[in-house]
Amino acid sequence: MRFRRLRAEPPTPAGLLRDASGRRSLDSDGYVVIDLLDQDQVGDLLVARAALGSTPGDPRSGLFNDTFSSEPMYKRQVEAAVAPIMTSALGMHLDGFRMVGCVFIAKWPGEAGRVVPHQDASFVDEGRFHSFMCWCPLVDTQVTGGTLEVIPGSHRYRRGTRAHQDPTNAFADLDADDVPWRALSMRVGQAVLYDHALIHRSGANTGSDVRLALGAPLIPSAATLMYALLAEEDAEVFAIDEAFFLDHQLDRLDLAAVRREYRSLGRRRVAGHLDRRAVVARG
Ligand SMILES: O=C(O)CCC(=O)C(=O)O
């Protein structure tokens, strides 16, 4: 008798978030806003940031993510101060996840802080798993403060391998009024968990103070942490670890060092083309 090999469906996010209605939102919309931190935890995080000072290399304009810094020591200090608070807070909501990094993201006042619509790079085999970013502003954040904006449901449109700095992960043509953007107005202490495949952007911070947030990628405990580099028409995928985010500068990644330091898992096709008309129509 011949058996047909069944292709495993990617598991839904169910099992990761304990709250059933949150799980449904993650599944259908690709994101959910949760009450993550209490006042003491927010206070501890702000005290930690004040003690550490702003990230070395931050030009104090535009948007600066700690992963852009060339100072692994600073990033390790952030990790030591911030990760225990975030892990314990996330542990109240989630089961079976691993937080693989934790960074500050500073958005300074002015137009330069705008972030073009994009999907994040993939960190897991998206044929089998969903991974998420926990984005947690440390100030109240509205659209005028440069908050995150998402296209609900867009985590389903283009899944697969999204390589480092692949221009096809960015969608400048979706920066338009006919696209069903939803701005996430969030209070301090709230966080959004969003699928790394969700299309998101953020506008200018029109206030006078820096908009500080934390970003923490989360992957299912059972998943292998991966990062893909473009290789001709395809991508080469590497098994990375948490140190990757500390030791490397993600905005000017030393590709040869990644190839030297991490085990290759082989070539994959990069995620396909996204049809703008379909995004608008689905809204
Ligand atoms: O913090 C922001 O405003 C944008 C962050 C973002 O888009 C990202 O980390 O992918």
Image: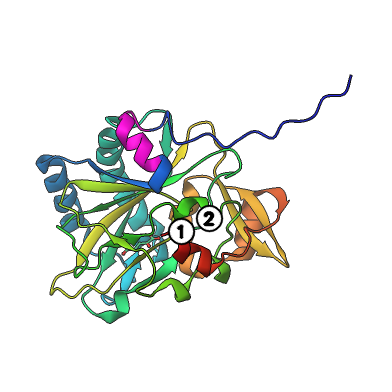
Q: Which residue is mark 2?
A: 157
Q: Earlier in the sequence, mark 2 or mark 1?
A: 2
The numbered disc on residue 282 is: 1
Q: Residue at x 50, y 70 (%)?
A: 252
Specify the farthest residue to the front.
Answer: 281
Q: Secondary structure at mark 2?
A: loop
The image quadrant that residue 88 belongs to is top left
Q: In the visual, does 119 lie left or right of 103?
A: right
Q: Is residue 2 left or right of residue 57?
A: right
Residue at x-position 36% and y-position 35%: 23
Question: What is the CA distance from the residue labelled 2 to the residue labelled 1?
Answer: 10 Å
Q: 254 or 105: nearer the eye? A: 105
List the single residue furthest toward the right.
1
- For this rendering, which residue is in front, 87 or 201? 201
**Tag 2–tag 1 contact (CB < 8 Å):** yes
- The kind of secondary structure element at disc 1 is helix
Q: Which residues are drawn in magenta?
A: 17-26
